[in-house]
Amino acid sequence: MQLRYRVLVILLFSITSLVCAQQKKLPNIVILATGGTIAGAAESGTSAGYTSGQVGVQTMIDAVPGIKDIANVTGEQIANVGSQDMSIKIWLDLAHKINELLATDAVDGIVITHGTDTQEETAYFLNLVVKSDKPVVTTGSMRPSTAVSAEGPLNLYNAVAVAANKKAKGRGVMIVMNDQIHSPQAATKTNTTSVQTFLSPMQGMLGAVLYGQLEFYRMPHNIHTTKSEFSVKGVKELPRVDVIFGAADMNPDLIDLSVKAGAKGIVIAGVGNGNMNAASLEACKKAIDKGIVVVRSTRVPTGYVLRNGEVNDDKYGTIASDELNAQKSRVLLMLALMKKHTAAEIQEIFYNY
Ligand code: ASP
């Protein structure tokens, strides 16, 4: 071979090896898809009506320009439901799958695509049962994939960027939506239709992510992932916990019915500082006497539920939810009820998680 051809071949070989080496250096991120509006489809780009969970994971990945430049991305379909149909079975499937994947060197981070309705619950649950400090990120969208200005692709791009970033390690499970990074312990869905729906009203967001560039402002301050005492290894179901919404002149019958139906725990989304009328408090007391754990949370969007505020928790045996809203109190109580605890221990759990 002539010298110049030999040089050309060597040059091409070196460039190819360099490109391959760089590709190999990209973090390996697995996207676990569960459905939601991000996978939703409508008849037209401006139609208000649509169906969640219509589009598969590969179609979602293919709709994100540049995603393959920031990570080696692979997708797996775990479910394809609107998150109003999210189930404990899917939570457990996700937890088992994530723990299995993150235990290997082949996976550096996980992204879960999920409807926004119950995303904070799934993310909070995983935050308590994932046994790894590698990044786990949930994301979704408020507009279906077929909408004019669908925001799902950018949310997915940003979620992958966060999961692929070393700075995200050790921060527990994170919700990435609309350029913001939130801790599920602090975050909640606050708007039924706006793309700016997740807020962390008491603690503020963890960080920001703009077109894949990210900055963290703080660490989550509650216990999560590797430090969490909760494990769902080998677990196939969780104890039943019901949420009962408080209101003026609320009827205590629902509390009695919940007990009859076999609930092991009840969360009251109480009025104000976790309050309820006298009749409901008495029904809670009866439930507690039967061994059911009752947590006082609140229907108010921000603030703490204080122990022994207007309700004497010491006398009634109720637990104050501290900062957790009712839906996340339910998640924590289901996990806490997997083992026998005293009321004082469960109260401590609510302070710590
Ligand atoms: N109902 C939808 C869901 O949670 C809403 C959304 O994804 O934004 O799946």
Image (tube, rainbow, N blue to C red):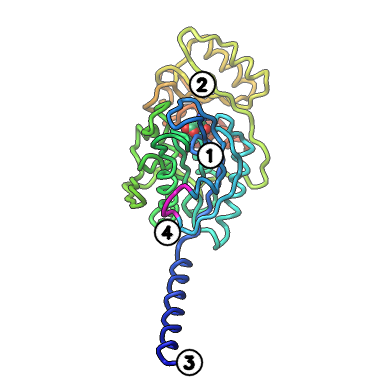
| Residue 2 horizontal/vertical position (percent) | 44, 92
Mark 3: secondary structure:
loop
Q: Which mark lies nearer to you, 1 or 3?
A: 3
Q: Residue at x 35, y 43 (%)?
A: 179
Cβ atoms at labels 1 and 4 below 8 Å apart: no
Q: Which residue is mark 4?
A: 69
Three-letter amino acid code at the position of disc 3: Met
Residue bearing the label numbered 2: 268
Describe residue 123's horizontal placement relative to residue 302 as left or right.
Answer: right
Query: What residue does disc 1 label?
Result: 125
Q: Is residue 61 above or below residue 34?
A: below
How far apart, in angstroms, are the residues tagged by discs 1 and 3? 64 Å
Question: How many angstroms separate mark 2 from mark 1 (CA)?
Answer: 19 Å
Three-letter code for the amino acid on which mark 1 is drawn: Phe
Instruction: Tell me which label, 4 or 3, sits earlier in the chain.
Output: 3
**Looking at the rendering, which quadrant does residue 33 occupy?**
top right
